Amino acid sequence: MKRRELLKQLVLLARESGVTFQFARHGGEHDLYYLHERAVWIPRHAETNELTARGELKKCTAYLKELNQ
């Protein structure tokens, strides 16, 4: 999955849940973002492994569901 597409999906998830998704800082090979108060590390590569991308989306979706309960 393209990095841009992963970030776009995370932004949409955040908007739907009414929380913020914002860039925090650059790391060595990853960038740090915050989804509300949860840290999300996104690889800084043009292509992200499909399993990695799906895993991050799944973790973020579960976090947002837990947050909205």
Image (spheres, rainbow, N blue to C red):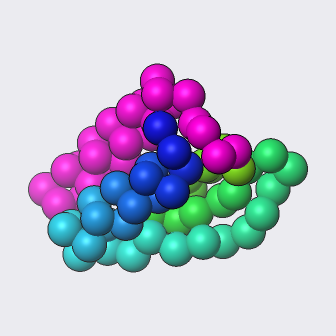
Q: Is residue 7 placed above or below 43 in the rendered structure? A: below
Q: Is residue 61 placed above or below 38 in the rendered structure? A: above
Looking at the image, which is closer to me, 51 or 32? 51
| Residue at image point 17% right, 60% down | 68
Count of labels in the image: 0
Q: Could you say which quadrant of the image residue 67 lies in?
A: bottom left
How far across and down, in percent of the image, does residue 29 sit? 80, 46
How far across and down, in percent of the image, does residue 2 sit? 51, 45
What is the span of residues highlighted in magenta in the rendered image? 45-69
How far across and down, in percent of the image, does residue 21 sit? 44, 70
Looking at the image, which is closer to me, 21 or 53? 53
Q: Does the rendering let one see residue 59?
A: no
Q: Is residue 49 inside the magenta stretch? A: yes
| Residue at image point 13% right, 56% down | 69
Q: Is residue 60 placed above or below 36 in the rendered structure? A: above
Q: Does the rendering let one see residue 30?
A: yes
Q: Indicate left or right for 11 with 43 as reference.
A: left
How far across and down, in percent of the image, does residue 43 sit? 66, 44
| Residue at image point 47% right, 38% down | 1
Hey, which residue is sitting farthest right in the picture? 28
Hey, which residue is sitting farthest top in the picture? 51
How would you classify the magenta stretch by its main secondary structure? Answer: helix
Q: Is residue 35 inside the magenta stretch? A: no
Q: Indicate left or right for 29 with 15 as reference.
A: right
